[in-house]
Amino acid sequence: MTSKIISMGEWQKDSDDLKLEALFRSGPIEDGGFSAGVVKRVRRRMWARRLTLPVAIGLGAILSAKPFVQLMGLSLELLARAPQKLSGVIAMPETGIAGLPAMLAGAALFATVLVLLRIAEDY
């Protein structure tokens, strides 16, 4: 059993509709591989853009690791040399001062993971 309901869009076709249908029914236009080359180039650039930022972040993290550790050591030395009155204001126990570089490194790692997840979300 076939439906006898005809929608108005299918029933009333003018000359423009017929021309458009004829254009869409035609085969692809031969371009000598131009379209394939453009698509290949766009995909290559897209992958290059996707990889550039993570590689730059990784390289920056590798290059800044040693100065970061030196900065943490220097901050511990400055904190240890601070007068007792000033260190009383900070009110950090001795074990807390020793674990400060590990806490700061963990916080930096956590922030890096958050940034990487945000970047991965965009792609």
Image (spheres, grey):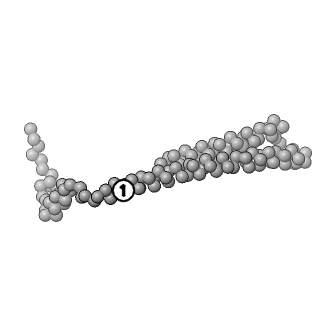
Q: Position of residue 68 (x, y in %)?
A: 73, 48
**What amino acid is labelled 1 in the image?**
Gly
Res 12 visible: yes
Total marks in image? 1
> Going by the picture, which residue comes out furthest to the top?
95
Q: Residue at x 12, y 55 (%)?
A: 11
Between 84 and 33, the one nearer to me in the picture: 33
Left or right position of 76 against 64: right
Left or right position of 37 against 120: left
Q: Residue at x 50, y 46 (%)?
A: 121
> Going by the picture, which residue comes out furthest to the front?
32
In terms of secondary structure, where does tag 1 sit?
helix
How dense is the environment of label 1, judged by Cα within 10 Å: few (below 14), some, or many (20 and up)? Answer: few
Q: Quadrant of the N terminus?
A: top left
Left or right position of 33 against 16: right
Between 61 and 20, the one nearer to me in the picture: 61
Which residue corresponds to mark 1?
Answer: 37
Q: Position of residue 49 (x, y in %)?
A: 50, 54
Q: Residue at x 9, y 46 (%)?
A: 4
Left or right position of 93 against 1: right
Name which quarter of the figure residue 36 lies in. bottom left
Res 79 visible: no
Q: Residue at x 66, y 47 (%)?
A: 62
Q: Position of residue 55 (x, y in %)?
A: 57, 49
